[in-house]
Image: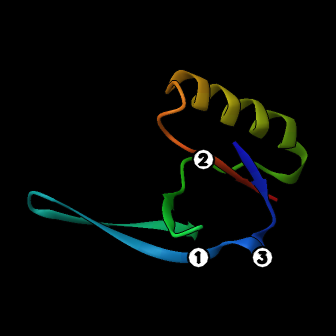
């Protein structure tokens, strides 16, 4: 899990096509990789956000990368 400043990433919108529907997802680009938004936390929930990211990373056995933006 990486903790980044919002200036280190580029925001974008992603489009996901599934059968008969199209879904627009908020995303970002970091080091030429696309990431989708998973969950939001308030400023006061920084510890919870870090714990969540760490748990997700470990649960996925490092197969997925997680970013935390301040």
11 lies above or below 26: below
Camera-near label (2 vs 1) is 1
Check disc 1 and report the residue beneath it: 11
Hey, which residue is sitting farthest front in the picture? 31
- Percent position (x, y) of residue 31? 59, 67
Q: CA distance from mark 3 to mark 1?
A: 10 Å
Residue 30 x/y as whole percent: 60, 67
Residues at marks 3 and 1 touching, judged by CB atoms closer than 8 Å = no
Residue at screen point 54% across, 31% down: 62
The residue that disc 2 covers is 39
Contact between marks 3 and 2 (CB within 8 A): the answer is no
Q: Residue 23: x, y in percent?
A: 30, 64
As drawn, the label of residue 32 is none
Residue at 75%, 40% (x, y): give it. Answer: 49
Can you say whether 68 is above or below 30 in the image? above
Residue at x-position 84% and y-position 42%: 45
2 or 1: tag closer to the N-terminus: 1
Q: Is residue 19 left or right of residue 29?
A: left
Q: Residues under labels 3 and 2: Cα distance?
A: 19 Å
Please tell me whether mark 2 sits on a helix, a strand or a loop.
loop
Element on which disc 3 rests: helix
User: Depth check: 65 or 49 in front?
Assistant: 65
Examine the rendered structure and indicate whether residue 54 appears above or below residue 26.
Answer: above
Q: Is residue 3 left or right of residue 14?
A: right
The residue that appears at 60% across and 24% down in the rendered structure is: 58
Q: Which residue is mark 3?
A: 7
**Residue 20, image x and y in percent?**
9, 62
The image quadrant that residue 9 belongs to is bottom right
* Label 3, residues with CA under 10 Å away: few <14, some 14-19, many ≥20: few
Secondary structure under tag 1 reads: strand
Report the mark closest to the observer, 3 or 2: 3
């Amino acid at each position: 899990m990486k903790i980044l400043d919002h200036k280190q990433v580029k925001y974008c919108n992603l489009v996901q096509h599934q059968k008969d529907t199209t879904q627009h997802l908020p995303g970002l680009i970091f080091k030429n990789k696309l990431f989708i938004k998973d969950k939001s936390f308030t400023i006061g929930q920084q510890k919870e956000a870090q714990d969540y990211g760490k748990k997700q990373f470990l649960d996925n056995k490092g197969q997925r990368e997680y970013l935390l933006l301040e």
